[in-house]
């Protein structure tokens, strides 16, 4: 299992937080996702053999928010 943190931009409310979390969880191979609204981050646990980090960024962007790999 692999884990990573994303920096997410554009979230302003609980609905945004839920939308980003659901977008990440919908990616095949993602085991879990936790989105921290005040911190603007998402922690994602996934199968590294099935999911590329860029796919996670893309899922957030398709949901209408900005994302990049956190430092």
Image (spheres, rainbow, N blue to C red):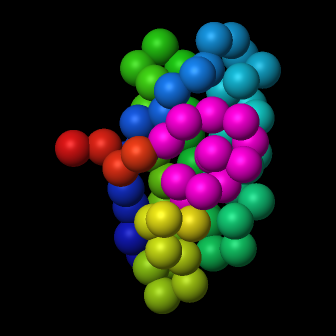
Q: In this view, does 65 lie above or below 14?
A: below
Asked which quadrant contains residue 39, the reply is top left
Looking at the image, can residue 54 be seen? yes
Q: Residue furthest left?
A: 71
Q: Pick the quarter of the image with the N terminus.
A: bottom left
Q: x%, y% of residue 35? A: 55, 34
Residue at 45% of width from left, 79% of height from top? 48
**Rendering coords of residue 24 (x, y %):** 65, 53
> With 61 as the anchor, is 36 left or right in this view?
left
Magenta segment: 56-67
Q: Nearer the viewer, residue 58 or 31?
A: 58
Q: Is residue 63 magenta?
A: yes
Question: Eyeballing the image, is 2 above or below 15?
Answer: below
Is 54 within the magenta?
Answer: no
Percent x, y for residue 32?
60, 55
Q: Give residue 16's position: percent from left, percent from top.
A: 71, 24
């Amino acid at each position: 299992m692999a884990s990573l943190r994303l920096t997410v931009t554009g979230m302003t409310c609980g609905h945004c937080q839920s939308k980003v979390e659901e977008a990440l969880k919908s990616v095949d191979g993602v085991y879990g996702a936790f989105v921290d609204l005040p911190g603007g981050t998402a922690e994602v646990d996934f199968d590294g053999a099935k999911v590329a980090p860029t796919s996670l960024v893309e899922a957030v962007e398709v949901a209408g928010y900005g994302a990049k790999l956190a430092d």
